[in-house]
Amino acid sequence: MRRSTDPVYLRVLEDLRMRIREGVLEPGARVPSRNAIIARYGVGETAAKHALQVLATEGLIEARAGSGSYVRKLPAARYLEHDRLRFPGSPFGIDESGSPEAGAPIADRTAPAYVGWEHRTEHIAPPASVARRLGTVAPAELVTATRYLMTADGRPVQLATSYEPAGLTEGTAVALPEQGRYAGRGVIERMRVIGIEVDQVLEELSVRTCLLAEAAALALPVPSTVVVIERTHFAANRPVETADIVISADRYRLRYRFAAADPAA
């Protein structure tokens, strides 16, 4: 419920957003102009302009020069599955059924996507936010940073950057995540090789407007909304790896499956 002290533009924004999401304004439909909003909602030009700007930032509408604003035609969202056993290199792997909806008939499914990974590893001084999440990394200590770009049938799907304290794995068989006999095995298995048992994984999800570099890498229009996952692996409360994963909020839905615990166990 809106409060009387809320900005005036929120009344316009909420109504237009609802009309778009409920299909009253369908994809491709022209959005009321600034003057039409002023007349319909009884607001000023600033409020009308701000409401349209927010809808554009959220990726719900797009402006066309000399024509006005229109509801964006978004591609059908595909699922990214949370399945560490099948996709050990990332917490999310693309649903290989190719179906945009769970339970769709077999005849409606497309061929499985060809999934590929590009990656690059280097030793760097950690960003301040990463150093805080790793906790034990001293200001002068380097981290092993591995940047990934996941593609499906040649199209970018997600960005991920993993950070590990360089001193933790230095000189071991798992010093580089994507080289050697344990390449691509994932954090949990690699850490177990050097006697570290990961016993907890924390993931924090947030939504924001993408950065320009993210938009370029993921082939997204600017502005676009992305889901950001901060993932950290812990061993006995000690963070041993942390990662930032970035995914288009328009094109993909994140789907989690968890086995139900037996209360009698």
Image (cartoon, rainbow, N blue to C red):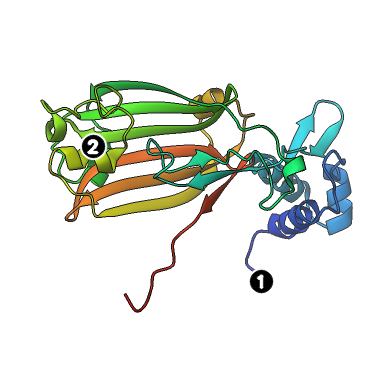
Residue denoted by label 2: 190
Q: Amino acid at mark 2?
A: Arg
Give how far across and how far down residue 241 sits, in percent. 26, 41
**Residue 158 bears which disc, if any?**
none
Q: What is the CA distance from the residue labelled 1 to the residue labelled 2? A: 49 Å
Q: Position of residue 65 (x, y in %)?
A: 81, 25
Q: Residue furthest bottom?
A: 264
In this rendering, which labeled residue sits more in front, label 1 or label 2? 2
Q: Quadrant of the C terminus?
A: bottom left
Q: Residues within 10 Å of mark 2 (few under 14, many from 20)?
A: many
Residue visible at 69% across and 57% down?
A: 10
| Element marked by disc 2 | helix
Along the viewing direction, whichever of 100 and 128 lies nearer the viewer: 100
Give the quarter of the image for residue 177: top left
> Does residue 167 appear left or right of residue 37 in this picture?
left
Front-most of residues 150 and 29: 150
> Is residue 255 in view from this perspective?
yes
Please tell me whether residue 45 is drawn above or below residue 155 in the rendered image.
Answer: below
Q: Is residue 129 visible?
A: no
Point out the image quarter for the N terminus.
bottom right
Q: Which residue is mark 1?
A: 1
- Of residue 146 and residue 78, the one placed in the foreground of this image is 78
Give me the residue at 79% from left, 56% from top. Answer: 22
Horizontal side of residue 179 vs 170, given as left or right = right
| Residue closest to the far front | 106
Identify residue type, mark 1.
Answer: Met
